[in-house]
Image (tube, rainbow, N blue to C red):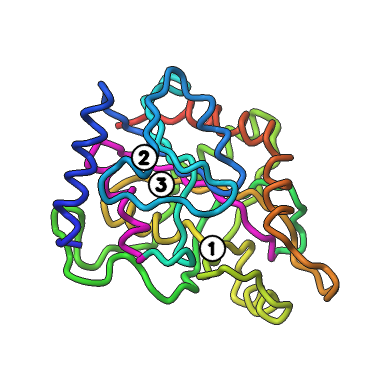
């Protein structure tokens, strides 16, 4: 991580020179969920390819731009589209935007994703607040020399998903009359969807949903002392029928169907969050 210090400072300086403000709330928006960034008032928009050392989104459903502005009374920094290990990026490159957010003043990070349902009680279109994760990627962005300016050598991950924010999200969902599941997210490298046997194994592990992102970002944020909240949009549920085949287009379509309640929930959560 130490070798990334100058890179993140260069990226942070580039962004700060183009935005007159300090974002305290960060948003990372997953597959088909980038429309939340369209709600930001008077945004400063910076394409990823313009930012020094920033990765570039290569997957459909990820717009590939950074937005800074105001949302529900908060100054926010939003990634409209994320990066994945399966795209060929290193774990450190996946963490890089989180490190830059931290350098710019972000103290609370909200991560969203599209995920497959492992829990058979879930239905496509459900929203789930993540309460814990299983790292089935077998790698993480903290491997290598530790940068003590970011965080400790051995960060605890037992509170990777900030309990107070999980409770806040559940309370907001109840007040908005939006059903919100709770569950454990298991992260894989991708880019393939799971076999039937793998889905059964993940269920035995105690996973409720599976995806190809989020965990590296949460690890980097927790290591860096950020409070975190993660919301999954369940786009399909694993079935025993071997003819049931999931496509990326179906994932995007399912995520788009949740748009009204996802926007309402996210705006209400952002409105309710208090930044220290």
188, 49: nearer the viewer:
49
112, 17: nearer the viewer:
17
Badge 1 is on which residue?
Answer: 212
Eye-nearest disc, 1 or 2? 1
Give the CA separation, mark 1 to mark 3.
18 Å
Magenta span contains residue 97: yes
Q: Answer left or right for 116 relative to 169.
A: right
Q: Secondary structure at mark 2?
A: strand
Eye-nearest disc, 1 or 3? 1
Q: Answer left or right for 37 relative to 149.
A: right
Q: Is residue 49 above or below residue 195?
A: above
Badge 2 is on which residue?
Answer: 108
Magenta residues? 90-118
Badge 3 is on which residue?
Answer: 228
Image quadrant occupied by the N terminus: bottom left
How many C-alpha atoms fall within 10 Å of the one at disc 3: few (<14), some, or many (≥20)?
many
């Amino acid at each position: 991580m130490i070798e990334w210090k100058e890179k993140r400072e260069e990226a942070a300086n580039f962004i700060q020179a183009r935005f007159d403000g300090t974002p305290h709330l960060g948003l990372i928006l997953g597959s088909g969920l980038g429309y939340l960034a369209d709600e930001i008032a008077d945004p400063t928009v910076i394409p990823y390819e313009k930012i020094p050392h920033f990765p570039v989104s290569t997957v459909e459903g990820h717009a590939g731009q950074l937005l800074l502005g105001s949302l529900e009374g908060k100054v926010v920094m939003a990634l409209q589209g994320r990066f994945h290990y399966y795209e060929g990026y290193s774990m450190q490159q996946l963490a890089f935007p989180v490190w830059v957010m931290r350098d710019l003043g972000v103290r609370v990070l909200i991560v969203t994703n599209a995920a497959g349902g492992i829990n058979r009680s879930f239905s496509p279109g459900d929203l789930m607040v993540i309460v814990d994760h299983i790292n089935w990627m077998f790698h993480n962005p903290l491997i290598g020399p530790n940068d003590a300016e970011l965080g400790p050598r051995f960060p605890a991950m037992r509170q990777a998903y900030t309990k107070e924010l999980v409770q806040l999200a559940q309370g907001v969902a109840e007040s908005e009359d939006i059903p919100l599941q709770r569950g454990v997210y298991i992260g894989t490298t991708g880019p393939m969807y799971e076999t039937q046997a793998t889905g059964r194994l993940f269920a035995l592990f105690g996973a409720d949903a599976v995806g190809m992102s989020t965990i590296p970002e949460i690890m980097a944020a927790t290591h860096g002392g950020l409070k975190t909240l993660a919301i999954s949009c369940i786009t399909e549920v694993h079935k025993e029928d071997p003819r049931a085949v999931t496509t990326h287009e179906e994932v995007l379509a399912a995520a788009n169907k949740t748009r009204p309640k996802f926007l309402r929930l996210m705006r209400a959560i952002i409105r309710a969050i208090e930044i220290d």
